[in-house]
Image (spheres, rainbow, N blue to C red):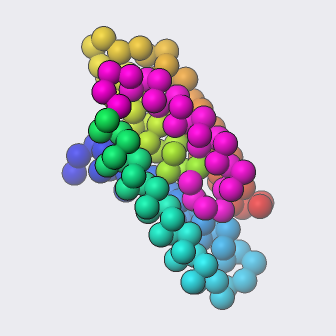
Amino acid sequence: MSRRNAFAAASFAVAAVLTAIGTFKDDGDSVGEWLLVLAISAGVAAILFWVVVPRVGESAGVAALVLAVLGFVSLAVFWTGLPSVFAGAAAYLGVAERDRREGRPALAYAALAVAALVVMLAIVSAIVG
């Protein structure tokens, strides 16, 4: 499995688990709602990982930071599962930028830090929210 596919699968899996926690913690009769949210998360993950990420090119650090910030903004609608999907795409690009010989590691580390914060806040939101 490629690194991109692994990040995409992990991002979607985190979104699925967090949305399940948020959906089923109060009542257990919301399967249709959860499946709709999963479809949204899967669609956004597909767009991010197979349309946006391959087109980034040399600006992976900037794109990683932008996606991490979008993940932070999407915490306003945490129930959609989007924060972890954006954070996963940001982390993938951040790692790619960090590993590049001529990359900008400061941007990569900033994106990774924001992405980690987004996932932590998404976890808290799923449990508390």
Q: Can residue 120 be seen from the camera position used here?
A: no
Q: Residue at x 66, y 62 (%)?
A: 79
Asked where in the image residue 97 lies, by quadrant, the reply is top left
Q: Quadrant of residue 120?
A: top right
Q: Residue at x 47, y 31 (%)?
A: 64
Residue 74 shown in magenta: yes
Q: How many marks?
A: 0
Would residue 54 appear left or right of 48 to someone viewing this image?
left
The spot of residue 91 in percent (x, y) is: 45, 36
Residue toward you, 10 or 43 = 43
**From this viewpoint, is residue 71 visible?**
yes
Magenta residues (range): 56-82
Residue closest to the far left:
1
Location of residue 9 in the rendering, given as x and y in whole percent from the top left corner: 37, 56
The residue under the point 72% across, 83% down is: 27
Q: Nearer the viewer, residue 126 or 42?
A: 42
Picture quarter with the C terminus: bottom right
In the image, taking residue 57 as reference, residue 10 lies left or right, namely right
